[in-house]
């Protein structure tokens, strides 16, 4: 999965709210951004900016380094977005959403639902029975709902998320395979080098012993 700007924003917004969007935009694609610079650019009080940064920090979405300002004697914090954690958090949220949708699909598939013709309520069989199949709001007779469309929408959403997660897993697998192959190559090279040195040493030792024998 490529972590698009849109996805980053989606995650950040869920934590900071709309208000945090300019901050995220200032941080994205940069490293070690001074919090004073951020406050300046956002035209916001440093305290507000810090509050947002700490919130992101609590979710492992940013990291910081601090440096002492030699003249003023206080520490300045420099912030960086943690794109790996953002990706992780995005996947986690998608998985949670998937589980929720799957549960809803199960309910929709196995239960019967009843609705009021005036659209006041939607009840499952047990609830409808409690009200003797009459609307608790307006008293109209409830009718069984055809939820085929609802089920279809849920199925589509689930398939979409599953495909996205699968793509992500495939890419991760591919990345892991590449890094494994690289590690193996380094190891082989090291071993070859060691062997060569060992062979050279043996050759020298043999030469020496041959000389001695002479
Ligand atoms: Zn009603």
Image (cartoon, rainbow, N blue to C red):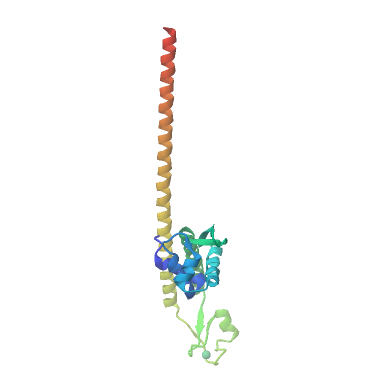
- Residue occupying the far top of the picture: 214
Q: Is residue 60 left or right of residue 185?
A: right
The front one of 75 and 97 is: 75
Residue at screen point 55% across, 86% down = 133
The reply to whether residue 156 is in sight is yes
Image-quadrant location for residue 207:
top left
Q: Which quadrant would residue 198 be assigned to in this image?
A: top left
**Residue under the image location 50 percent in, 71 percent down:** 14
Query: Which percent across, then down, holds residue 200?
Result: 41, 23
Figure quadrant of the N terminus: bottom left
Residue found at the far right of this picture? 130
Residue 190: percent from left, percent from top: 43, 34
The residue depicted at 43 percent of the width and 22 percent of the height is: 201
User: Which residue occupies the foreground of this view, 63 or 128?
Assistant: 63
Nearer to us in this view, 207 or 132 = 207
Residue 97: image location, x then y, percent = 49, 68
In this orientation, does residue 98 appear?
no
Against 66, residue 152 (above or below) is below
Q: Quadrant of residue 168?
A: bottom left
Question: What is the residue that sits farthest to the front in this orientation?
Answer: 71
152 vs 202: above or below: below
Number of numbered discs visible in the structure rendering? 0
**Spot occupied by residue 169 in the image (x, y as percentages of width and height):** 43, 56
Looking at the picture, tell me which residue is in the foreground, 158 or 207.
207
The quarter of the image holding the C terminus is top left
């Amino acid at each position: 999965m490529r972590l698009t700007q849109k996805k980053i924003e989606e995650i950040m917004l869920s934590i900071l709210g709309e208000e945090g969007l300019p901050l995220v935009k200032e941080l994205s694609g940069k490293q070690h951004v001074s919090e004073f610079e951020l406050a300046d650019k956002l035209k916001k009080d440093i305290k507000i900016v810090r509050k947002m940064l700490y919130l992101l920090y609590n979710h492992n979405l940013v990291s910081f380094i601090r440096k002492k300002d030699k003249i003023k004697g206080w520490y300045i914090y420099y912030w960086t977005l943690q794109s790996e954690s953002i990706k992780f958090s995005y996947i986690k949220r998608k998985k949670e959403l998937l589980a929720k949708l799957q549960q809803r699909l199960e309910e929709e598939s196995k239960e019967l639902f009843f609705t009021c013709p005036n659209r006041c309520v939607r009840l499952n069989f047990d609830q409808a029975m409690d009200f003797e199949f009459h609307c608790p709001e307006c008293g109209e007779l409830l009718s069984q709902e055809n939820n085929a469309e609802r089920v279809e929408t849920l199925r589509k959403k689930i398939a979409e998320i599953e495909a996205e997660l699968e793509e992500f897993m495939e890419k991760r697998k591919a990345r892991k395979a590449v890094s494994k192959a690289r590690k193996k190559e380094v190891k082989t090279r090291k071993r070859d080098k060691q062997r060569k040195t060992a062979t050279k040493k043996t050759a020298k030792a043999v030469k020496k012993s041959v000389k001695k024998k002479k």
